Image (cartoon, coloured by chain):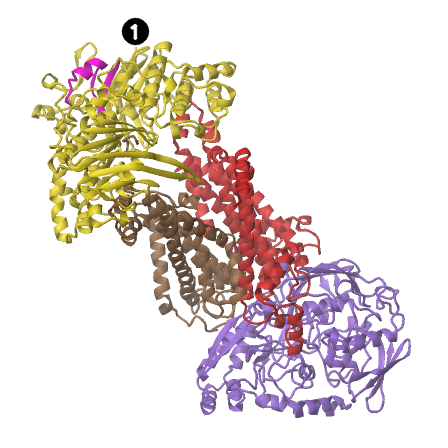
Amino acid sequence: MIAASQPRLRRNSQTLTSSWPTRISLVVVVLLLLLVIFGPLLTPHSPTAELGPPFARPSSAFPLGTDYAGEDVLSRVLVGGRSVILIGGIATVIGYLIGGVIGLVAGYQRGLTDSILMRGMDALLAFPPIIFLLLLATGFGNSLTALTLGIALIHVPGVARIVRTAALETSVRGYVEAALARGDRVRVILRREILPNIWGPIVADGGPRFTVSILLVAAVNFLGLGIAPPNADWALMISENRSGLTLNPLSVLVPAFMIAALTVSLNLLADQIARAHGSSVDVQAMRR
Amino acid sequence: MSATALKVRVKLRARHPLVAYAFRRTAIAVLLIALVSLIVFAATEVLPGNAADQILGRGATAAQKAQLTRQLGLDRPLLAQYGSWIFGVLHGDFGQSLASGEPVSTFIAGRLGNSLILAIGALIVMIPISVVLGTLSGVRRGRPVDHAVSGVSLALIALPEFVSGTILAVVFGVTLAVLPPTSIIPVGSSPLTDPKILILPILTLCFAGSAYIIRMLRAGVVEAMASEYVQAARLNGVPEGRVVRRHALRNALAPTVQVVALTLQWLVGGIVVTETVFAYPGLGQGLVQAVTARDIPVVQGITVLLASFYILVNLAADMTVIILVPKLRTEL
Amino acid sequence: MSEPLLQVSDLLVTTVAGDPVLDHVSVEVGRAESIGLVGESGSGKTALAHAMLGFARPGLRLSGGSVRIAGEELLTKSETDLRALRGRKVSYVPQDPATSLNPSMRIGDQLREICRIHGRQTETEEIIPTVLGRVDLPSDRQFQRRFPHQLSGGQKQRVAIAIALACDPPLIVLDEPTTGLDVVTQAVILQEVRRIQRELDVSLVYVSHDLAAVAAVADRVVVMYAGSIVESAATDVLVARPRHPYSRGLVSSVPDHRRARRLRGIPGVAPAVDDHPVGCVFGPRCELFTDACAAEQPSLVALSSDHWVRCIRSEDTPPPTSEPRLAAPGLAADMEPILRVQELVADYRSRGIPFTAVDRVSFIAQPGECLALVGESGSGKTTIARCIVGLHQPSGGTIAFDSRRLQPSARRRSLEQRRRIQIVFQNPYESLNPKRTIRDAVSWPARALRGCSRQQAEQEVATLLDRVRLPAGLAQRYPGELSGGERQRVAIARALAARPDLLVCDEVTSALDVSVQAATLDLLRELQTELSLTMLFITHDLGVVASVADRVIVLERGSLQEEGDVLEILRAPAQPYTRRLVEAAPSLMATENGLPSPADVP
Amino acid sequence: MAINNSDQTPDGRPTRRSFMRGAAGLAAGAALPGVLAACASGSSSSTKSGATLASGTAGGKPKRGGHLIIGLSDGGASDVLSPWVTPYYSAAARAQQVFERLFTYGPQSQAVPQLALSAEPNSDGTVWRVQLRPGVTFHNGKTLTADDVLYSFRYVANPKNNAESLPRLEPFDLNNSRAVSPTEVEFQMVRPLGDFQTAMCEKDLWIVPEGTVDFSKTLVGTGPYKYSHGEIGIAYLFERNPHYWQTGAAGGPPWTDSVQIQILPDPTARLNALLGGQIQEMTFIDFASARQYEGGSTITVIRSPQPNTTPIYFQVDAAHFSDVRVRQAMKLSMNRVAMVNDIVLGYGTVGNDLFGKGQAVYNSSLPQWTYDPDKAASLLKQAGAYPLDVTLPTADAAPGMVQAAVAFKQYAAAAGINVTLQKIDAGTYFGNNLYLKAPFYETQWAQGFESQALDGLVLNAPYNETHWYDKPWSDAFYAAQGILDNAKRTAAFNALQEPLWKEGGYLIWGVYETLDATTPNVRGIVPYNSNGFGNLGGFNFKYHWLA
């Protein structure tokens, strides 16, 4: 018996673009995505051509100067976002697909399947992420597919757990039990009743997870086990231009700033979306 | 499960549940470690190319390579190889490094100590600061200190270790020349003999790690501060200081332990990168070298060690949480 | 009366956005006097209770007026001074015992803490045993070392009361202390509170939405509606002859097992904090509403020395209704029973240890009849309902519907069986999918179970909404925009969309306010007669049984205690367990009757 | 174009120096080591840019004492203590502090007597008598005798010991060689050997005490320093050998009390350590940083005019490449001038696919290959290999390697050659299972023609990267080696270079100096122009002292 104290109208959640941090992060994220799509078309020079002396100071020809191999830093920055965001993005999506299915099945079936799946997740969680990626690199060398799948696998346990919790919570709700009593098919119940209600926590968790993917891609590239030169990649640029930090600092600072801007604004945006759905990302993370 | 075993389990569970629970969780942990070792072995054995090429390298004749393959037992079926490897690991013998022929355990032993010093150093610095900052911003939610701490921690989380490390090394090590930019120590001695070299690597690790703890801790504290029993305590006249300490924080303690255990997962990754940036002679740098040298036994040894270490830490964290939360402790 | 202990005058409490939660409220509590604050959800009663301790929940602000305890003004005090005062001058007993005790602090320590902070360390070791004894809790060391989760609901609430009594405050404010407890424990707690109040000459403010519970404890009752006091009078005066239309509606909505009558309830919905109407705030829902009422907010007028009312037409307020119950549809004696439950056994596994929830229960339900399953929590009544509807696999016995055996799981039952048996759940806020419109929710059963096309099903929605007395305009809105009562009616409409023959109602009104509950029960009773529906009504509230059910089955810990006609069982219960239930259930009629002794409370 | 940052040397790369007698005109055995310290280092560098060789740090009177830490650019998990296989720079540097040879290279690659005083051949160079230096003791106190020398040579010659210098002893008939007296050894030869002294400077022909078998824990040699202890892949400590033969009564080298070899493969960390004063010397500073700090006061740049090259090579018997037209198309698809300008920043000159530029044995008469993508494309079309897809692994293993690969990909595209780059970690670039197997690879050598031939072109050469299996060419080479007369031998070697230039597998785009760096207070470094491990004055740390 629950005391009837539920407010009649749930206060509609704070609209997304009302607070200034959200607005800024939204703008930054949109800008970066545009950069990834149109960047390659705007490059003043070919990003992989050696055009001038290495670590040259910014000049009219090279607004951000040149890097270790004399390539134009600006062109490489314009192109460098693609690999980080694409690999990070695809890995996160795959992680969600696999993790989501496991979480739904575990949350919905409960019983034996639930515990087996969750124990399996624990085994995956046993590996600190970078160690797992290094392990894969031992086997598959610099293959980007192995890197993408590796990062996806790292996300699977976390996603599975969130989706499982959300599914568990929703499956005891009245409207799901009514559907069960009606004998609706499982697929219908999942599609009509459960999935629409667990989008909130999943999206809220998406932001930080995408950031984690980007940082992992960056770290692996830094260790020289990811993207190969002469491809332009923000993380690789930081790694290969480190020795020139005193000569042309922009060759390291600009890509570093791009990664930071992307990850910070993503975190901020995800946080706002989470608040709109009533459970801030941190609380979400706590339950992980 | 035979009847007697069931009876024993129930009796054990009845008399001291905590021990029974610890026993069960340790058994699961050991199982996990075995599973992890299987995954590590499988991942590394799936390699293109043959280990003998590695050792003899260039110039070796086919006959020499075949002879070495037999000598290392690499021609036996995978399961037998795994059996002997695991048997060795249990006795502390991780096999021989392909590149140098030295036993892997000596390679690991030297570097393990250094990495532990770095990890423990980072934890000692990181945890108190982030616990204080996390709690402060949680208790004073929405006030300036909260915005400041949350803002900074949000930015720090986004800064990869190799960026902050590089910048720190150049600024403090080279331009200001105040702190050693790399970890050079007298041969064979421990980093503690010259602690100055630890400052920059630990600072690099603290940036990312502490940001993570602060954000998670803040969420835990905010949730506790908004709880019913905190409001009841305030209505019973308990002074605010005591409300925060005895009621809110006491119950936010358990999630904090879990957060710290989670942070270790990132710390291990951070150490690998930080050791490479500062050329710190630890296990992380050793692992990167081994991976690029495709030195399988070294990779297997270090990975199993790190993964098992991490599983045990998780187990310890779970046990601490059980002890901290009365409800869990009594309902085992 | 001597100078009042507590004096609240012209108190204004607003939300952060400035909307009035308490609109210039004034109330006084004399020494050793016990008053009841009654109001439905959103009336501001909890805000007033908090204000009596100078406290405002996050999101609210004490914006004006004054609160004085023994002459000492609270609203101007600093937080630290307030802290020194709370627990010593006035103490508070929170609503939900399960969450208001610190989970990681032993009982003894929580009591010791209170004594220490109010400067009574020296006598702590004597205070604790006496105060525990006072609330009938064991005072030995072993009990004091227990943690909150190791106590029952009733014990936890008694600890909360003990904490409130620890420093002998002259005034205790209790906020819905028994709402979370079962009826027998509630009765015992009410009796103890009453005894403590008399023995210690303590002033008491008892806040609740349950008029019957308040009547059992308070000398005087203050009725609140939408942030202001509408009537204040001696308890028996108010119960017998409420002068404010809202009080009258409230009294006639309270189900009472001693007086089986038709419950009318109050139409409409209480105004939200941000859209109070001009003039009398109850106006829109009042039968006596005239233009004069709408002119401006009537003031509180004294009808006698201690009877105040805020209504200009208080003279014309009719007495509370007491119409006879709606007659049951024609029960043909020889009709085959629509539902036959034989030797039903069902159990649950909690952490590996199975326990039996239903133990060989058998009963039948006649077509068109309303059969009530009554019992406290843990009696198995809900499990039986879930077995009938196919949500729980029984481990023994059979269930026959229209004399054909029902498969344990709904999925394997025939379309016809799934259509003819429908269920409505308890929590209105979880009974509808928040992401689907009302039209979508109500039309789906017709499409799924009657094979209607989308257009056909959606056309029926309007008639179904009308049948449950909801405006057709609600169809395109989302559940989030509806009140608890409105959502429950939509759930009923959804069940009716399948044109069922058996409707299972699992505690459908226990989460609603009294007035909304009355209206819903009245609707269900009408539907049962109009559609000659068979209804299986699961509840713990004997009053509800009295006003809705034809036959009743009493359950205790999974076994059937008693079965028979409602009025006979309520008047003369055969089994001791039933008798205890009937005596314990609060009722407006029996303000002075004896309550069961605390010994029998688990 | 600056090089990112030079670091490891390819392991397994015996960039040993060998130098034909004719170059510096110094008679064998003339220059005593003592003289070395005094002679100015200003030998003209062969770099066309005419930049005089930055003077080393030879000036002033040496001071005894101090601890010297040197940051090396390679080494790591695969380090071993045994001196018999020194595939990369830090391995060679370590061995050279503990062990010594009969003869060793001087700054101009001339053979300088070390444990031997002199070596006299018989009439046709089939017997060589060697006088040993008297009064030399091993670290364990044992005196050096002829038996130790013979034991050492026999140890290297024994295949079971996997010694890298085994092919060098191919002309020796060690069974019949004998110890004439405790201080004189007579070597019988299976075939005439023209230059015994230079052959002795080669690779790891260390002299160890007779009977030594285990080289994995303790190391006993005659060198200036004794091996104290170390941590695999991290750092190694060497302490002064109090009884070193060169110290003498007046107190000669080694000047510092101890030397610490620090393994710092990460170029940025290595440079930071030097700038931060944590190490006193470092090998391989990248061109851009060298350009920035040269002449400044923060650090001193040491320029050694070695014939460094980072050739891209193809196996001549691999698919398509067996066709000579394809090989020549590759040579025409490399824009050598642009690469030298962009990568080497004036520290080097254009290459002509031949080793040892700037040394006596170098056929400079052959026309210079130029960048002609259209001709290359037509050649490929004729050979039916247009467009040509190749995968080129590369690494930061040496200055300019990655930049060269990137440049080659950029310019070769015009000739219809699509290059896919595959970056591999520098530490394992020559230790992985791709090197010597992949048909197309990038490598690093700093040797003259004779050394290079022995390492990679003769039939049983250990590093026959280009699969140059040409028996007549090998026999001609061995014959040339046997010519006693310098001029004739040089002419023979130059002639042997023509087929390499015309259809060899090596694409050598440029030659550049070795750039190292030290803190200003380091003195006593005489830059070596020899090929092979010549950093920081041929790794002769005994001459370095701290002002």
Which residue position is annotated with label 1? C2
> Is C345 in front, or is B245?
C345
Q: Position of residue A131 (x, y in %)?
A: 53, 57
User: What shade does chain C have?
Assistant: yellow
> Is D427 in front, or is C383?
C383
Query: Can you name the residue that lies furthest to the front here?
Result: C334
In this rendering, is residue C226 above or below D396? above
Q: Position of residue D246 (x, y in %)?
A: 84, 68
Q: Is residue B24 magenta?
A: no
Q: Residue at x 56, y 73 (%)?
A: D401
**Occupied quadrant, residue D192:** bottom right
Q: Is residue C416 left or right of residue D45?
A: left
User: What shade does chain A have?
Assistant: brown
Q: Which residues are magenta?
A: C219-245
Instruction: From the rendered image, report the letter of the chain displayed in red.
Output: B
Q: Is residue C242 magenta?
A: yes
- At mark 1, the secondary structure is loop
Q: Name the residue type under label 1.
A: Ser
In this rendering, is residue D236 above or below C517? below
Q: Is residue C286 left or right of residue C406?
A: left
Residue C411 visible here: yes
Instruction: From the rendered image, report the letter of the chain displayed in purple.
Output: D
Query: Can you name the residue that lies furthest to the right here?
Result: D181
Q: Position of residue A11 (x, y in %)?
A: 27, 39
